[in-house]
Amino acid sequence: DTAVSQTPKYLVTQMGNDKSIKCEQNLGHDTMYWYKQDSKKFLKIMFSYNNKELIINETVPNRFSPKSPDKAHLNLHINSLELGDSAVYFCASSTPTEPATNEKLFFGSGTQLSVL
Amino acid sequence: GQSLEQPSEVTAVEGAIVQINCTYQTSGFYGLSWYQQHDGGAPTFLSYNGLDGLEETGRFSSFLSRSDSYGYLLLQELQMKDSASYFCAVSTVSGTTPLVFGKGTRLSVIA
């Protein structure tokens, strides 16, 4: 059983298109995240949701919109895709209810987005 | 804001010991984590230090000195499969504050 699953694994699309990436976790975690990893492997937080509510929204263009229908799902919608959006996008989850383990993120397998 | 510094690349011989250092600057420091990422894979949790000292998990150990804003990951009895990128990450508030990652250290284990 996959703990954090995201689809699709690969996404190739043209500039200007709109695309979505889905993420689901079956760990019962309260908090979910989207991270972007660029070609230099720098992992940067984009969004953080706790129990369906947005907590953190880093300096991300408003073309990116997260949607959390329930606390097990956090999807990422991207409008008007640009070349610079090409990267690997990772979904992750954690639970803040266990102080000893709340810093442990569980990552999905990533979505390689290529904008042509 | 937060900043983390770690070496970009390290090469070590199979069977040896390697130490990957991480220095950080942040306000409201809470803990330091380490993650491993193989090429094409997802980051996976290795260890967490919330207090000063050494945490040992099998061949991997992690150390934290809060007064020095410094930590390291120690890998012993290196194996070829340890070739990967290693990221340190800081957290500043217990709970929902997301981790801020360093830029990663690429470890190459050679025969």
Image (tube, coloured by chain):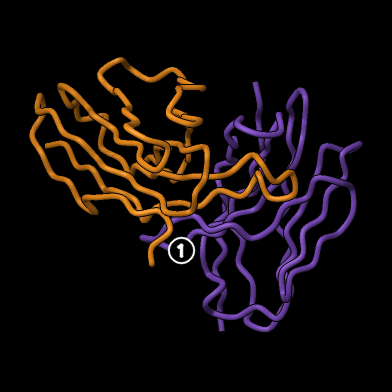
Task: Tell which of B39 and B89 is nearer to you.
Answer: B89
As drawn, the chain in orange is: A
Which amino acid lies under the numbered mark 1 shown in the image of this protein?
Answer: His
Horizontal side of residue B93 vs B54, given as left or right: left
| Count of numbered marks | 1
Q: Is residue A104 above or below residue B107?
A: above
Q: Residue at x 39, y 45 (%)?
A: A90
Q: Residue at x 46, y 63 (%)?
A: B38
Q: Secondary structure at mark 1?
A: loop
Task: Tell which of B9 and B40 is nearer to you.
Answer: B40
Q: Percent x, y for residue B64?
A: 83, 49
Q: Percent x, y for residue A106?
A: 51, 52
Quarter of the N terminus of chain A within the rendering: bottom left
Q: Is residue A3 above or below residue A84?
A: below
Q: Is residue B99 above or below residue A46?
A: below
As drawn, the chain in purple is: B
Q: Residue at x 57, y 33 (%)?
A: B98
Task: Tell which of B77 and B50 is nearer to you.
Answer: B50
Other residues around mark 1 within 10 Å, as few (<14) / some (14–19) / many (≥20): some
Name which quarter of the figure residue B10 lies in: bottom right
Q: Percent x, y for residue A95?
A: 59, 43
Quarter of the C terminus of chain A within the rendering: top left
Q: Percent x, y for residue A25?
A: 40, 50
The residue that disc 1 covers is B38
Q: Residue at x 30, y 15 (%)?
A: A62
Name which quarter of the figure residue B82 lies in: bottom right
Name which quarter of the figure residue A13 lies in: top left
